[in-house]
């Protein structure tokens, strides 16, 4: 799974989001416990303009790992960009709670 993660990140850097998404999805099938893969998939979806899918991926990461700082931050940023100001503070509050417990 690690090879697919590295290749997915490389594909994303060179402007191949479809290939990156395929790599992250394949890696997720091999290691469904890797919360970073959900966040990576969310970032790809966000990059290509599929905000609904991006939000879903961040949500999946948070369902599995409630205190995932990368997922909380990515989801809060997405919601703020979409103008969902009422939804974003709950993510920010959760992030604040997470940081204060660390």
Image (cartoon, rainbow, N blue to C red):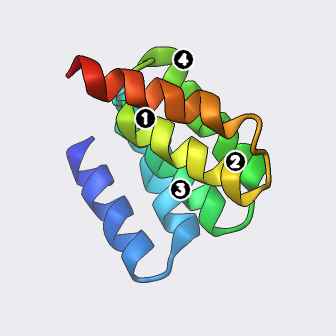
Which residue is found at the position 75% from the left and 44% from the top? 85
In the figure, is residue 48 to the left or right of 98?
right
Using the image as rendered, state which of residue 7 and residue 44 is in the foreground.
44
- Circle 4 packing at 10 Å, graded few (<14), some (14-19), many (20+), is few
Query: Please, is residue 3 above or below residue 93 in the view?
Result: below
Q: Secondary structure at mark 3?
A: helix
The answer to which of marks 3 and 4 sits earlier in the sequence is 3
Q: Is label 1 in a helix, a strand or a loop?
A: helix
> Which numbered disc flags the more N-terminal residue, 2 or 1?
1
Mark number displayed over residue 63:
4
User: What kind of element bears circle 4?
Assistant: helix
User: Mark 2 or 3, which is nearer the eye?
Assistant: 2
Residue underneath mark 1: 28
C-alpha span from label 3 to label 1: 15 Å
Figure quadrant of residue 23? bottom left
Sort mark 2 into few (<14), some (14-19) or many (20+) by Cα contacts within 10 Å.
some
Q: Residues under labels 2 and 4: Cα distance? A: 17 Å
Residue carrying label 2: 79
Disc 2 or 4, which lies upstream in sequence?
A: 4
Between tags 4 and 1, which lies in front?
A: 4
Q: Which residue is mark 3?
A: 43
| Residue 76 x %, y % | 58, 44
Q: Earlier in the sequence, mark 4 or mark 1?
A: 1
Q: CA distance from mark 3 to mark 4?
A: 17 Å
Q: Label 4 to label 1, Cα distance in Å?
A: 15 Å
Question: Whole-percent x and y of residue 68?
Answer: 38, 29
């Amino acid at each position: 799974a690690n090879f697919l993660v590295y290749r997915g990140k490389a594909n994303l850097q060179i402007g191949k989001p479809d290939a990156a998404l395929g790599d992250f999805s394949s890696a997720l099938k091999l290691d469904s416990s890797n919360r970073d893969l959900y966040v990576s998939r969310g970032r790809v979806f966000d990059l290509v303009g599929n905000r609904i899918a991006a939000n879903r991926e961040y949500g999946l990461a948070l369902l599995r790992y409630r205190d995932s700082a990368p997922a909380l931050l990515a989801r809060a940023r997405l919601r703020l960009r979409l103008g969902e100001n009422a939804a974003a503070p709950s993510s920010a509050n959760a992030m604040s709670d997470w940081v204060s417990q660390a």
